[in-house]
Image: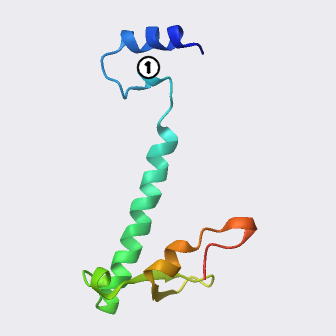
Amino acid sequence: MNIEMKNKIVAKNKRPSSNKATGRDYSYDKEYQKDKVAYRQELNAEARKKGIYGKRATKGVDLSHKKDGKMVLEKKSTNRARQGSNGKSTKK
């Protein structure tokens, strides 16, 4: 799609984030965000159970998912550095 064509499409719709303006389908993004919300709810519930909810930042710890599904406390820097490159699991 050339620039002139894209600008013509955007000019037809005032809302810049609409599907018509961008030519993009946002249904995938909506589903992805739902999954992320559920993931955060699970972590927060576990933090409350362990009594560290709201104290994680000062302690410098995260809840890390293990391969067997359990959650353990782990240093924030170690947990967030694990990116899953070269086909390795992102779980401890």
Closer to the camera, 4 or 65?
4
Q: Nearer the viewer, residue 12 or 70?
A: 12
Q: Residue furthest bottom?
A: 50
Q: Amino acid at mark 1?
A: Lys
Q: Residue at x 45, y 85 (%)?
A: 75
Q: Could you tell me residue 76's position as x and y percent?
A: 44, 80
Q: Which residue in the protein does label 1 denote?
A: 20
Up-down: is 88 above or below 18? below
Tell me if 75 is positioned left or right of 2 in this view. left
Residue at horizontal 42%, vertical 20%?
21
Relative to 67, 7 lies left or right: left
Coloring applied to the structure: rainbow
The quarter of the image holding the C terminus is bottom right
Image location of residue 72, percent across then percent down:
48, 89
- Residue at (30%, 16%) from the top-left corner? 14
**x, y percentage for residue 31?**
48, 49
Where is residue 48 shown, x and y percent of the image?
A: 30, 84
**Is residue 80 placed above or below 5 in the rendered structure?**
below
